[in-house]
Amino acid sequence: MINVSVWQFHYQASLYLTVLTSLLLGVFVYLRGPRKLANRFLAAWSLSIVGWSYAQVRMPFSGSYDEALSYGRFIHFAIAFLPVCYFHMVLAVLNLRKPLHLKVGYVLATFFTSLVPTTPWLVKSVSARPHLGYFVDAGVLYAPALLPFFFYYVTYALWLLFRNYLTATGARKNQLKYLFVGTLIGYVGGLPNYTFVFNKEWYPLNPFSTYGVPLYVLIVSYAIVKYRLLDISVIITRTMVFAGVYAVVLGVPFILGNVYQDAFTHWLGTRWWWVPIGLSTILATLGPFAYRLLQRKAERRLMREQRRYQKTLRHASEGMTRIRDSRRLLTVTVRLVVRAVRMTHAAALLADEATNTYRVASSWGNRGRLAKGLTLRDDDAIIKHLQHTRKPLVHDELAHLAGEHPDPETARVLEQMMRLQASVAVPSLIDNKLVGLLILGEKRSGAFYTDDDLEIFSTLANQAALAVENARAYEQLKETNERLQKALDQMALSERMAAAGTFATGLAHEIKNPLSSIKTFTSYLQEKYQDPEFREKFFRIVGSEVDRMNHIVQQLLNFAKPAPVEAQPTNIHRILDETMELLNNDLIARHVTVRKAYLANGHDTLLADGNQLKQVFLNLLLNSLDAMAEGGTITVTTIARDRQQSAVSNQQSADGEELTVEIRDTGCGIPAGKLGHIFDPFFTTKEKGMGLGLAIVKQIVEQHGGRVSVKSWPGRGTVFILELPRMEIDK
């Protein structure tokens, strides 16, 4: 066993300190954001350093050559992946893409690790060193291959950090500066350990340079605390709990293995390591449960107040859209923030596009009301800053930045924040456009605003802006609807008066003719009553005219109060054939030929009211007959077409189809100027008729969930197109 000298003490102490600090950093960063790529690679890189430093400190004091060789090989597994993992982490931090470099790096790292256990090309052997025990002897590829690979990826990553540092501004510049300086110190501190591989020693770099690695951890931790690199409001608690739990998990077996190794060897021989490994397994199994339990209890105590108001604000942001009054919405929001967070005051400013200003819409608190008279312009420094960054402004951080890097624009922003009595200014954004801002005073407790707080406030401000826009739109819509309703009421009254006039004119015209005939005959009734021929003609004509008036009244009743659809399976071809059979004599008398182009059987049945469809077809066929005074051809066609959904009872059509019926004639056609009115009640192009036939056709078809349309070519003919939904019939 090698005696521990001062030199050996510093060698071991620096490496054990590296193990501890790198482990804490890796866990710290990973817990901060396990889904972020940069956090994952920084954690993986830190844990690789943990593996390297632990094996590095254990190898010299191994009990046998084989044990030392195993540690030496493990070290170079970590060394092969350290540079490419670091390079990958830097790319993630800088949001850069270097796919070729990454692929080559990981391929080379895998190649080097495959050489370590199988060949002596990297790890040739282990042998004793001054002040130390065993150490690795370099193979033939160590200097010409592994070291250039290591230095290239580390140097390139540091160059990328430095180059981006030169172009960065504000807090980002400080972040990159501390990352660059810290990691540079860490690598410079760790690299002298390579001298042992070549059987050389550079005093005082060996053993003191390795202290640079934990120093790197301290520098990055300082940057995190000072410049909010990462959110530590909760992570510090988690890290300390994690460190405490896993200090027990890792430390107890380690101490037992070192202190009682001789006793375990006496009892178990070469299998003495079973005891620390078994204990490690048990503690590692219990560790996660203990960590979660202690973490929950610690955070519950530490973050009780913060989580209370964050939960309140989160619920408030979700319920804002329910308030329809914009003024009330802002008042509720500002008061809620002041009371929930227990801050001195708060105010909400909204953009006024007409004047290009931002005016205080609501304020609350001890000092918040003082801001009511303030107005900000578009060109004010604070507005321009919020428009540019679209992130919350924290007065203390801005003051610190101004102290380190004096800037007139920053000074103007600070001056305006003081005028607004603002500790934090949170932008309200809609589609990246600044529509307002939320001014927050100090917390009464004196605590600072955490990143979690700022995130909640940003969400609240954006939700408030959206809710205000919705409330304003609702108010405008309500006002517009009221004006529209008045206009519609006036229009409906005008339409009713016009319809009443049309109805009265049409009815008077239709009833006037039979009444005139009846009046003419009744004027001669007393004089010619004894004439049998006159009496026979009188009763025949008067009866006919009374029937005609009765028919007119019935048509009006049918149109005004249509009969309900009594839908049942109906064969459309049978209805068409029966209708044309009724008109057979008229067809022959007028020299009209009928052609049928029916679709195949199996698609000709639909749910419909057969009697009403017969009335539809009868009206259309009669119109076609009237249009062909000198004869012609009527073509009746049925077609199955796709249809998205039936309008009747909102059911899905069978096979997604509708049944189309086309009735085409070769008559005189309809003038283009009258085509748009033929379905209007009381509109007619005939000398006889009251103009209700096509109106009733349209009414019946629409009651069946269908559509009716017409095309006409004057002098060539007309076609009526009926589209009726085919619905699945329960067979």
Image (cartoon, grey):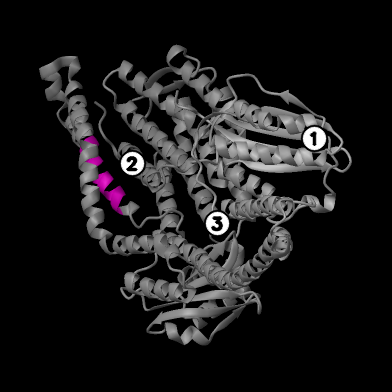
**Which amino acid, mark 2?**
His
Q: In the picture provided, is 641 more to the left or to the right than 290?
A: right
Q: Quadrant of the C terminus?
A: top left
**Does the segment drawn in magenta span residue 242?**
yes
Nearest-to-viewer mark from 1 and 2: 1
Give the spatial CA distance, label 3 vs label 2. Answer: 36 Å
Q: Quadrant of the N terminus?
A: top left
- Residue 634 seen in this snapshot: no
Relative image position of residue 53 (x, y in whole percent): 37, 34
Compared with 343, 561 (above or below) is above
User: Helix, strand or loop at disc 2?
Assistant: helix
Residue 175 vertical placement versus 576 (above, below): below
Residue lying at 48% horizontally and 33% vertically, measured from the top left: 82
For badge 1, the amino acid type reads Asp
> In this figure, which residue is indicated by the disc labeled 2?
10
Residue at which label 1 appears: 665
Picture disc at residue 226: none
Q: Position of residue 608 (x, y in %)?
A: 54, 35
10 Å neighbourhood of mark 1: few (<14), some, or many (≥20)? many
Q: Is residue 303 left or right of residue 645?
A: left
Q: Dot 3 corresponds to which residue?
A: 172
N-terminal of the pair, mark 1 or mark 3, is 3
Q: Which residues are magenta?
A: 237-250
